[in-house]
Amino acid sequence: MKGSCLCGAVAFEVDKIPESYRACHCTACRKSGGHYWSAFPVANADFRFTEDRGLKWYRSSEWAERGFCKECGSVLFWRAFGGDEISISAGALNGETGLSIREHIYVADKPDWYDITDGKPQKPVWD
């Protein structure tokens, strides 16, 4: 599976993707992307950059950082410091994926301007 940012200054390949992903409604995800953020984790061993000239990392908390394209602004990645996986924005993948939402997390932080109506599990935090 291949993916990229909007302008192509960050591109990547993933050997395996899961069948489902989490939709995160936390404040940090909403502030970084403008809405809730849908992402799936991939083992570092199954992930590689094919282009990273636009890649920039931002320390978004004491324990994690977010990767984005400094050219077009696409929010692409999230990873915990010292972890063995990277979370990839589902929207960054090219073509059909077969992915579906598994659950919604941090719904306690969800704003009032949208509703979650897909019937998937909703967790107040991520446990």
Image (cartoon, rainbow, N blue to C red):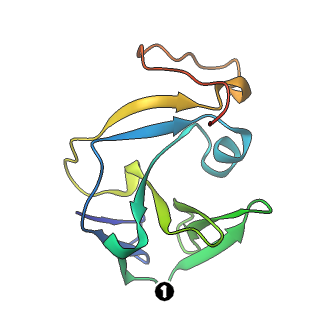
Q: Does residue 31 lie above or below 109 as drawn?
A: below
Q: Nearest the camera: 57 or 85?
A: 85
Q: Does residue 15 lie above or below 36 as drawn?
A: below
Q: Nearest the camera: 15 or 1?
A: 15
Rendered location of residue 14, percent (x, y): 29, 67
Total numbered circles: 1
Rendered location of residue 102, percent (x, y): 39, 31
Q: Quadrant of residue 21?
A: top left
Q: What residue type is labelled 1?
A: Arg
Tell me what residue is drawn at x 36 percent, y 75 percent. 45
Q: Nearest the camera: 55 or 71?
A: 55
Q: Quadrant of residue 123?
A: top right
Tell me what residue is drawn at x 28 percent, y 55 percent. 17
Left or right: residue 45 compared with residue 75: left
Rendered location of residue 115, percent (x, y): 56, 15
Left or right: residue 117 compared with residue 63: left
Tell me what residue is drawn at x 71 percent, y 47 percent. 28
Q: Name the image quarter holding the C terminus.
A: top right
Task: Give the SS element for disc 1.
Answer: loop
Q: Does residue 80 lie above or below 112 as drawn?
A: below
Q: Quadrant of residue 83?
A: bottom right
Q: Does residue 115 lie above or below 21 as drawn?
A: above
Q: Residue placed farthest to the right in the image?
A: 62
Q: Mark 1 points at which residue?
A: 53
